[in-house]
Amino acid sequence: MRLRLSFIAVLLCLEAPVARADEGNGLAVTDPGVLRALETHNTHGLSLAQLLDPARTTPIPNDALFALPAMTQIRAALDDAFARYLADHQKHQPRVRIGVGPGHDVQLFDQAMLTSPDARFVLAGIVNRMDRAYVAPDTCGEIRLIYRLTRTAAGTTPPRLPMTLNLVLRAKDPNDASVTCADLAGRWLDSALFTETGAARADRLLKPDGPLATITAAHVDRVETNLQIVHRPKSETQEFRTDYLQKVFRFDATVKQFREAPMENQIDRDRLLADAALGRAFRDWLLAPVNLLAFDRGTVLIPEKFLATMSLSSTPAGFAPSALQPEFGLMAADGKGRGVFSERGVIAALERAVAQGGALENIRSPAGFARRLNDITCGGCHQIRGIGGFHFPGANTLAEQSQGTVPASPHFIGDQPRRRDIVMAIRDGKAPDFSRGFSDRPQMRGNNELAGSPLLDGWGATCYRPKQNGVADKSFASWTCAEGLACQQVGADASSAIGMCFVK
């Protein structure tokens, strides 16, 4: 564990220059000065309150925010999730003290901050996700505004709390013919060349021909929340661990409220293992060649009847299979019950998909299939190469200076070349390649930019450790290390085939 935590600390230092370089491609707004100006803009402010209630002109504290009719069900659902978590804790660990503050064995997130007049959600970043246009082509994908829960009372520390709220908007109105997907993609890419800074850059981003000009309250699709529900400090009786609660709320335009919804591709492991008929239905659906090929490419959209409405993700999870991974037990080889999938069944399904003309890009073995089962979920992706439990912690816009913080995780940075290629294809009227690799090993399409970095095959990169004198697993055989580095074990479990690139 000590080696792992030391590695993460050093990795964050190494990632800073890589992050700044790759975020300059025009597909993310991370500069604190620009974000401050966008949130408080006099005619087109992008505060959370203004986008939920256009009649408002300034950001508002959380007590007023959660009093808005649109937000009431979000607070109720979060309260219910907290109550369920506490009940489960009391049932399984009645002697372990849990509560708010450092005097407890398990430190609970302070729910009072959700409705406090001394806290609000501050705009911490804007991210272009037109690479998700395969979900809804007529909206050209998505634009995401990420808000970080922040204390606003003077002298409170730490000011930034471990919670983000992601307001997901449709990139464009499908009924608006004044701008095309190609036009919008071009605007975002062109913004990489803007030379203005601070408020002047914010103004240019919001101009009628700017990439943010199309953002309005009418484009709101859903809210995604992610918060560190508990923190377990390392002690003589327990290992360091944090649990993150994730939920999704879709906007119901008929009643103008956000309502709890199934999370995209968050496979409901417990229901599938408990309900044999549902498990078989999911197995048959996913192993059908057309769905298996989409699963391999990372573009699968799993039917809602197989999905959960909540993800509880624990970190660090480690590389070896364990119950901390969200889909542990679905493969019979995991050792938990009979499972839903068998290695023999997966091999046969892969062969059928290839025989029908499908070219597999990532999944070439049962181990690759099992890894994708975790990787495709919100919780499984969340566990990979994050910073403090987040892939986009965002900029600290209320600080006097940036203080060297990195607004995005290695996972986010490693995926930027793929996202940029897709946006460029949309701009040029070409068919985009929406496929993606595994969350902790970027596709080779970014090889020229990422080679030798901690994101691909450099020091700290995720890699494959084949068994001595054994046959390399085809799903991971390309996960090698740069010259001078070797794929080595991380942590105490020597059984994991996945390691990290370190000096030989």
Image (cartoon, rainbow, N blue to C red):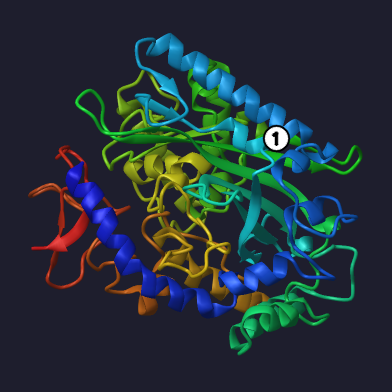
In the rendered view, tell whether residue 77 sits above or below residue 465: above
Residue furthest front as drawn:
155
Q: Secondary structure at mark 1?
A: strand
In the rendered view, tell whether residue 413 sits above or below residue 297: below
Depth check, front residue: 55 or 285:
55
Depth check, front residue: 465 or 241:
241
Depth check, front residue: 293 or 301:
301
| Residue 21, position as x, y percentages in the image | 44, 78
At a point 60% along the width and 48% down the height, the residue shown is: 153
Q: Please, what is the three-letter code of the amino acid marked with disc 1?
A: Ala
Residue position marked by numbered label 1 in the rendering:
261
Q: Quadrant of the C terminus?
A: bottom left
At a point 76% along the width and 43% down the height, the residue shown is: 65
In the rendered view, tell whether residue 174 sits above or below residue 353: below
Q: Residues within 10 Å of mark 1 (few under 14, many from 20)?
A: some
| Residue 146, position as x, y percentages in the image | 62, 56
Q: Is residue 492 visible to the viewer in this orientation of the structure?
A: yes
Depth check, front residue: 88 or 454:
88
| Residue 398, position as x, y percentages in the image | 58, 62
Residue 64 image-quadrant placement: top right
Position of 44 with respect to 36 (left or right) is: right
